[in-house]
Amino acid sequence: MKQKRINLDQYLSKYDKEMSSLARDLRFMILEQVPDIDEVIKWKNLFYEKNGFVFAIVIHKDHVNLQFARGTELDDPERILEGTGKKIRHVKINNTKEINSDKLKNMVIEAVNLNLTN
């Protein structure tokens, strides 16, 4: 089955160059880790779904968040997850180096696996 994808250039056109670049790099990493994930726009954010909502890219003025739907269930020994909601947690991303970290890549895979097993 063909995965859902958005027109990324059109979506990112309303953001400044630096945040657009971070979001683009984060999206690339996500699709590299989980090529068969669906990508949709909800509430003006990029949502990624596989057996339900897994995570979202939320672009802010000076950083980008990777928001995990089941963040409270993720293994986070380095405590990079932020937030106080019942389930959702996010990682604040300020640069490409943070995107390419093994810990973030592992969280992406773990988040997808959570959705596939429960």
Image (cartoon, rainbow, N blue to C red):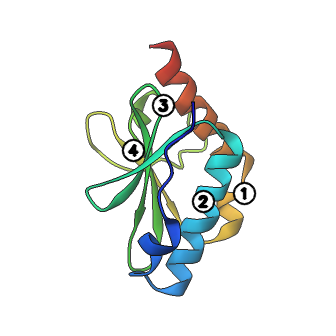
Q: Which residue is mark 3?
A: 50
Residue 116 screen position, x and y as percent: 52, 19
> What is the quadrant of the N terminus in the image?
top right
- Which numbered disc covers residue 26? 2
> Which dot, 1 or 4, sits closer to the camera?
1
Q: Which residue is mark 1?
A: 100
Specify the amino acid type for callout 1.
Answer: Asn
Residue at the farthest top position: 118
Residue 115 screen position, x and y as percent: 47, 23
Residue 14 screen position, x and y as percent: 38, 81
Q: In the image, is residue 55 above or below residue 109?
A: below
Packing grade of label 3 (10 A; few <14, some 14-19, many >=20) is some
Instruction: Name the foreground residue: 1 vs 115.
Output: 1
Q: In the image, is residue 81 above or below residue 7?
A: above
> Which dot, 3 or 2, sits closer to the camera?
3
Q: Tell me the residue at 59%/40% (across/down).
A: 108
Specify the amino acid type for callout 3.
Answer: Lys
Q: Which residue is mark 4?
A: 89
- Which numbered disc covers residue 77? none
* N-term-proximal mark, 1 vs 4: 4
Q: Quadrant of residue 89?
A: top left
Instruction: Name the foreground residue: 39 vs 90.
Output: 39
Residue 94 is at least partly visible in this image: no
